[in-house]
Image: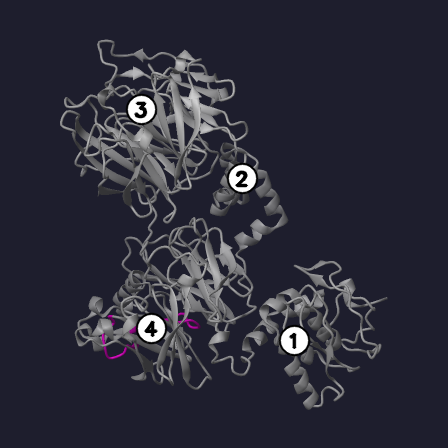
Amino acid sequence: MSNHYGTGTPVALGASLQRPAALLQLPRHGGRWKETRQVSLLDTWSESDSCIAGLLHIARIFSFSCFVHRAQIAPFVRSLIHAGQLPSECWMIPMKSNKRMKTEEAPSIIVPAAALPDEIVTEVLLRLPVKSLLRFRAVCRSWAATISSDAFCALHMAMPEDDGHHTSLAQTKLLAVAPTAAYDATALYSCSPQGPRADLLFTLDDVKGDFVDGVAAPCRGLTLLYDAVAPAYYVVNPSTRAFTRLPPCLDVRHSSVGLAFDARAKEYKVMRLFTKQNDPDMTCEVYTLGAHSWRPAVEGVVPEKLSAAAQFAVLTAATENLPPVLANGSLHWQIEHSLLTRDPAGVAILTFSVTEETFGWVQSPPFGTLGVHLVELGGCLCAVRDLRHASPDDGSNTLEIWKQQDYPAGTWFLDNRIDLPQQHLATSLQNPRVLGALGDGRSMQKIIMATSDHSVHAYHVMSRKLETIIPIADTAISYRRERRAIRICLFKETLVPVHQTPEEILFSSPMGKATKEILLRLPARSVARCKLVCNQWRRFAEDQTFIRSYSAHKSNEKKIKIMLVGKGTGRSFFSFAPLAKWPANKDAWLGSKVVCSKPCHGLNLLSTAKMDYLYNPCTGYHKTKFYPGTLDYGPWDTPNDCWRVPHNAFAVGNKNVGLGFNPVKQEHVAVIILYEFKDFKSRRCGFTCSAWRCTSASFQQHLDPPLPVNDMPPAYVDGVLYWMNDPRLGPCIDHAIVSFDIATEEFYVIPCPPHIAKWNGEESTRRLSVVELWEKLCIVVADVPENKLVIWKLEHGQWNRACTVCLKASSDYSLASNLVMPLAVDPEDGRILLSTGRRVGIYDPVKETIEELYAAGKHRNKLTASRFDWSPCIKSAVPPVPMLYEESLVSYPRRPKQRFLQL
């Protein structure tokens, strides 16, 4: 039976092989076998050629496909020849190139008959880079088992660098972490001084926003990332593109986490130091990669004598973006001396032994911690001191590197000084952090450091020169905001697995994938009920990754979905039902006027005169927004004598509320404008503007819009809320758009097209408002005499006329007696959904007709003595209100999350 490479049959390393066939079929791309290259074998090979011959031959063929450089194998073959382990006839002969190789003469390795032990084959594999080893797993099962074994991973990690590579900047690899352009994922890049290029390794789709805290130094090839938005922890291996999300842990405001390797237990540990709410004791939890959950450390509570130091250490790590430093088998936390003592010499460094899981301390350097950070260099604990902060009056432009001798009780001594050039002081060397050093194991030759402006510099110890080796601004990495957190670190290639959590193993199993596909096809209300089936389905329905996948799956349906909002029962303020299933009874009529927003990332905002409610109409989740008593103006309960609210189906009371989404912090935000008075004669008004954050349920007051806005609700597009101004108030007498960037919390004014911006005073027959259509910002011009709507769309910075809605054929939608707003466009046929607040219909732009979908009944007044239709406090029964919605499972925790988001 033939046993050549083209069959995919497992071959034991070191075992003899039969002569390969004249043509080889080699695997490429993830182990899929197909004919990739036909190679004629040399006639000098005999029947007893060993596995090393086949290995070298496959390596040669793979190198032609850019899989591995034969230069990494050839030196080892020469050493075997000189050592007498291979015959002297073994050498490299030229092989002619062809069009496929597009190179000049390429050498090939010929190995005569020899029976080599497994150790030599392993030595060959150990000299290959990780990228090639991952692809070599597709050769056969035995190779895959060998390369994936723990023993091989340990040997590969222990292999010394090639001669000259330990000090070569060209071989230096750095890992950069940055959000994508839309903040919908976090990307990991590999950077090198060889050129201003950043190679995308992979993306973490679940890490959204822009609050990945400072990246700590990797531990034996693995890197720990902390997503402060979720919050969640990730362990990634950049070399293998593998990552795992650690199990959820106790939600706290401040914590500090470090990754380390336990040399005695041969396992990776993640240590988390934090303070529980209403508990003065500092607690430490440990997670071992591959375990089920976090567990208390052996010394679970910090000793009382170190408790105060530990609290200050965690606070310093959180506020200064200083992760703990691993050195000498312990994690080290720096303590801000001003928080603990006035004597700089009396400050200690908190330590945590990875093996013993106990706390201790070491003496800090003989100076304060201002402008100081810890780092591990050459296996020693070091402290980097920025004299620009420590002694600003001296005008010193120097970084000092202090090293501790005879750890842990030894003294500190000055090891290096880095003189900063004057031209770098103002910009490129703000908040520098030393990442590591290159050397021969006995001394440092180059010191690598990064800055908050996302650039990497190298300091040559011998020549005392500082050079910029990687300007991140010249790469494709999208750092769009200034951050103090350093998101760049050195990394070394390794095959170490990250060990999936039991939850990840469950979700990736065949049963888990089948369960996911079933749940994705169910309505959101049914998925919420499926939580009661079993624990596995409950974990699926509550998993944030599945919730995002569900929203993405439902968004592909591209259907306009309408619900009717009625009076709720029990603990729910409102009831919801699809338009076709609404019960025809008046017991569900509302007790007061309600205005509903368009869906925003799966949620809707329902507003009454006094309250606002955040709802997921599919699952029934809701959150009530209470107005704080500190507001200068509150929501109206009765009309004001200075300004009486006109009848408007899209406005309620004295407020204008818009729901948006902060892509950086990944949370919904409601912006509320409350008016105290409007005087159209003097063009004066009084109003306040505030923002309500849904995650923390907190208010941010004293926002300052540049112009007063009209009564119509705002439009939300890509992280920005837009209002149309009120030309009757304020300094602007023409129409303009007021925008609010939710992430930056800044207002702007956008001019309208000149031919529609002009306001003709109180006698104007045109009404302007903004709306989101086609996922773009649009202006709706209501021309009352012509009874038509003209829609303008902003695209690529230009206003273009999109379409015209003619309402002459439908008296129920006449602009003379109604405010008509387009809500959505059917993606299939281009029909436009119109609403008057009491009626909803689909407009056909070809036939210029409206197909009515819903018409509300008349109000049943409870206070018949009221004569005014404009008053927001009329006690009347209101028919159900139509509302657009999205199928989603989005919700927020009942208790606000303890998040610390620091720039």
Sooner in the amino-acid sequence: mark 4 or mark 3: 4
The answer to whether residue 63 is left or right of residue 544 is right
The answer to whether residue 854 is left or right of residue 39 is left
- Position of residue 535 relative to residue 116, above or below, is above
Give the Cα separation between the discs numbered 1 and 2. Answer: 46 Å
Give the residue type at disc 2.
Answer: His
Q: Position of residue 245 (x, y in %)?
A: 48, 56
Q: What is the span of residues highlighted in magenta in the rendered image?
A: 349-370
Sooner in the amino-acid sequence: mark 3 or mark 2: 2
Q: Residues within 10 Å of mark 4 (few under 14, many from 20)?
A: many
Q: Using the rendered image of the protein, determine whether residue 246 is visible from the camera's viewpoint.
A: no
Is-magenta flag for residue 524? no
Q: Secondary structure at mark 3?
A: strand
Q: Which mark is residue 70?
A: 1
Q: Position of residue 119 (x, y in %)?
A: 67, 80
Quadrant in which the C terminus is drawn:
bottom left
Give the residue type at disc 1.
Answer: Arg
Residue at 37 percent across and 49 percent down: it is 664
The answer to whether residue 797 is left or right of residue 164 is left
Residue at 16 percent across and 74 percent down: it is 393
User: Mark 2 highlights which residue?
Assistant: 553
